[in-house]
Image: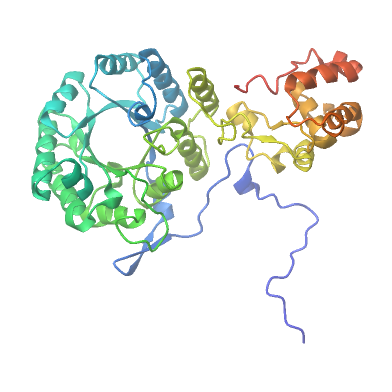
Amino acid sequence: MPNQEKFPLIDATEPNLMEETFGYDLPPRIKFDGPLVEYVDGKPVEFSTEEFLKRDFYVTDTTFRDGQQARPPYTIEQMVHIYDLLSKLGGPNGIVRQTEFFLYTKNDRETLDRCRELGHRYPECTGWVRAVKADFRLVKEAGLKETGLLTSSSDYHIFQKLKFKSRKECMDSYCEVVDAAFEAGIRPRCHMEDITRADIAGFVLPFAERLMRMSEQVPEQLRVKMRLCDTMGFGVSFPGVELPRSIPKLIYKLNREVGVPTSRLEWHGHNDFHKVHVNAATAWLYGCDAANATLFGYGERTGNPPLEGAVMEYIALRGDLCGIQTEVITELANYMQSIGFPIPENYPFVGRHFNTTRAGIHAGGLRQDERIYNVFDTTKLLNRPPRVALTDKSGADGVAHWINEFFGLKDDERISKIKCHKVARWVMDQYEKEGRMSSISDQEMEDKVRELMPAYWEKHRGETPGAGYDRIAD
């Protein structure tokens, strides 16, 4: 008797498109079929994905603080406009919950005042200062309810940078400023800088434990938050990695052993090793309610978690927009580029060519069903229809797709590749006969469709020609 196949074919005559996961109206769902498991102190520990999805996790923004350290300063007007768009993006549920401001210059303080004058509930405006009493007066004068305090945690910083004589002297100094915040009625958010290079058992956990004891003496709204700062991008999400680099173990120690609530833990990462986004999502999963991010990942050195990526990840985990206005991502990108902020052409969600295909076989797939080569309904969610860049690899399918998108044609109105063979031949001649190396521009295509398909042009030119392209920023 022949061996039975371990994985016999499940024949089908209709496609299984797995639309419960890959529904086109939203980013693909992230679904779990069990808990996450990590070994802590040699023992397996389960992290419930069901409990995770019940938590109020969210995004916080540092575009005006860490993001501004990597570029020339924004003007006041630019920051107010960006803040207004961030509020619109995060929606009424405050998915973009907070943002932070420097307080050191007159422009910093004026920007903060003008943003608050807009009256938005979200994102809440918070401050950032060093953990020294001289800086803290700025927070009191600004009238903020919460501020970040720079409380560096690695020995590289404690001894080499800040020149403390001992860890105890360092911790005492930090706690004096935390006490000052309590006395002023301001919630301190301790930024544990360089935590993935720190002595977790020797400094981080004792410091967190002391902050928890101090917090027990004040009202709930003043209790310390702790921002876990992966300053050099050393954090790793893989199971089995040892401390201090393990994100799951670090959060487990703080949350389950020290007792810091998930609502008072926040992750702040850097992209030195290309792990910045996945590390932020991992922090969410294992017990940080807040993932700190910047617009388009722009921040100190290699940058921070991209805020628009965190927003899309949030939707994928929730399976719902939750009031988020995703089209504002495109509006923000266009504005940022208009004030001199460079965005690579292939950058996800907002790069000029993020949903552009050049291969003819891909264009053929787009023409038949755009879901084949488009990640989700980018027209609906980002005001960005999928595009075709015409080259020698595009073929007649690519030309047909370009024409259909240019005229905004849908369903039965869409033209077949047979009807545009003259234009397709002209495109190929540019490469085969003329030796062209660059792609065909939209203006060239418009001119050739007018010339070689005059009847078609006459019929459709009043139907918003260019509708498929005029929303894409150069």
Decide which of 292, 342 is in the foreground and name it: 342
In which quarter of the view is residue 456 placed? top right
Which residue lies at the image location 29% right of the left edge and 67% below the top edge? 41
Residue 43: x and y, percent?
32, 69
* Residue 410 falls left or right of residue 74: right
Say whether residue 269 is left or right of residue 437.
left
Q: 361 above or below 120? A: below
**Quarter of the image where one finds residue 135:** top left
Please say whether residue 87 is visible from this viewpoint: yes
- Which one is nearer the viewer's eye here, 96 or 337? 337
Quadrant location of the N terminus in the rendered image = bottom right
Direction front: furthest residue: 435
Q: Is residue 453 visible?
A: no
Quarter of the figure with residue 101: top left
- What residue sits 45% from the left and 27% below the top? 91
The residue drawn where x is 58% and y is 38% is 26
Q: Is residue 405 above or below residue 151?
A: above
Q: Position of residue 57 (x, y in %)?
A: 38, 41
Query: In front: 135, or 316?
Result: 135
Q: How many marks?
A: 0
The quarter in which the C terminus is drawn is top right
Q: Residue at x 53, y 29 (%)?
A: 343
- Coordinates of residue 378 in the picture (x, y in percent): 62, 32
The correct choice, above or below, for 212 with respect to 436 in the image is: below
